[in-house]
Image: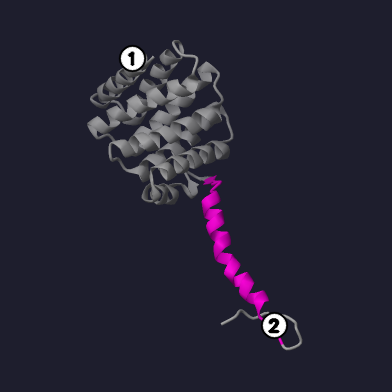
């Protein structure tokens, strides 16, 4: 199993390197390399998630080796996975989630720009969703949240970089983050103010409505 996985990663890496040396647009070249490799890998593995992970890792080994544009590489990788996943019958949002997380971690391994990687996977999710006539908002948000989760597992600095890259609107699509840590942080900031407003009372035992100084 490990030998087969290694072969898959190596073949995708070689395809990406070869594509980069051609005259083709790097994004389109990576779309084809990833889509074709994943479709082939699916013929030999029933574990779709593992197949996606190996293909994406191989693609980003190639991207890191040749110093290709990380944002374009991430976008092309996500689109390629979605195209192959449609053929294999895998749930699109599951494919988006798996791909985005592996892209971020793979980018970190070769010291690439995590912000560009995160933006790229969201853009790829949007473009791929349009091709498949899926809800682009759901696809974009799935990619963003997975990228953010992967970055959080890397470290605080990585998380900050990715969070800044994916929050708001990307390519005209509003990204919705299920960011429990941020919500908790916001709630924590508001608690002292509420406590101050209710903690000081007048001589008649009623709240004055003023925060304690």
Q: Is residue 151 left or right of residue 113?
A: right
Q: Is residue 186 magenta?
A: yes
**As rendered, which of 24 and 42 lies closer to the eye?**
42
User: Residue shown at 65%/76% (left/top)?
Assistant: 197
Q: Is residue 101 left or right of residue 175?
A: left
Q: Give SS at disc 2.
A: loop
Quarter occupied by the N terminus: top left
Which residue in the structure is indicated by mark 1?
3
The answer to whether residue 153 is above or below residue 16 is below
Q: How many marks?
A: 2
The answer to whether residue 168 is above or below residue 57 is below
Picture quadrant of residue 35 = top left
**As rendered, which of 5 and 146 lies closer to the eye?**
5
Q: Give SS at disc 1.
A: helix
Which residue in the structure is indicated by mark 2?
201
Q: Is residue 185 magenta?
A: yes
Specify the segment rendered in magenta.
Answer: 174-202
Label 1 or label 2, whichever comes before in sequence order: 1
Instruction: Estimate the x, y position of residue 94 in percent, counting from the top left.
Output: 53, 29
Contact (CB < 8 A) between labels 1 and 2?
Answer: no
Q: Within 10 Å of the Cα at label 2, are there few (<14), some (14-19), or many (20+) other Cα atoms?
A: some
The chosen color scheme is: one colour
User: Residue shown at 57%/29% (left/top)?
Assistant: 133
């Amino acid at each position: 199993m490990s030998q087969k996985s290694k072969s898959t990663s190596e073949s995708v890496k070689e395809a990406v390197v070869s594509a980069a040396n051609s005259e083709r647009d790097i994004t389109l070249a990576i779309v084809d390399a990833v889509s074709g490799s994943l479709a082939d890998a699916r013929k030999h593995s029933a574990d779709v998630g593992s197949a996606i992970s190996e293909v994406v890792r191989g693609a980003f080994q190639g991207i890191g080796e040749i110093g290709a544009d990380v944002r374009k590489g991430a976008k092309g990788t996500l689109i390629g996975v979605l195209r192959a996943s449609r053929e294999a019958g895998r749930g699109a949002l599951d494919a988006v989630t798996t791909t985005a997380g592996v892209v971020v971690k793979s980018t970190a391994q070769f010291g690439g720009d995590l912000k560009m990687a995160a933006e790229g996977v969201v853009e790829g999710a949007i473009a791929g969703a349009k091709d498949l006539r899926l809800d682009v908002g759901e696809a974009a948000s799935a990619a963003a949240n997975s990228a953010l989760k992967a970055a959080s597992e890397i470290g605080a600095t990585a998380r900050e970089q990715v969070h800044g890259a994916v929050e708001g609107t990307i390519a005209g699509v509003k990204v919705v983050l299920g960011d429990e840590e941020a919500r908790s942080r916001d709630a924590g900031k508001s608690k002292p103010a509420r406590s101050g407003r209710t903690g000081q009372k007048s001589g008649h035992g009623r709240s004055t409505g003023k925060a304690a100084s």
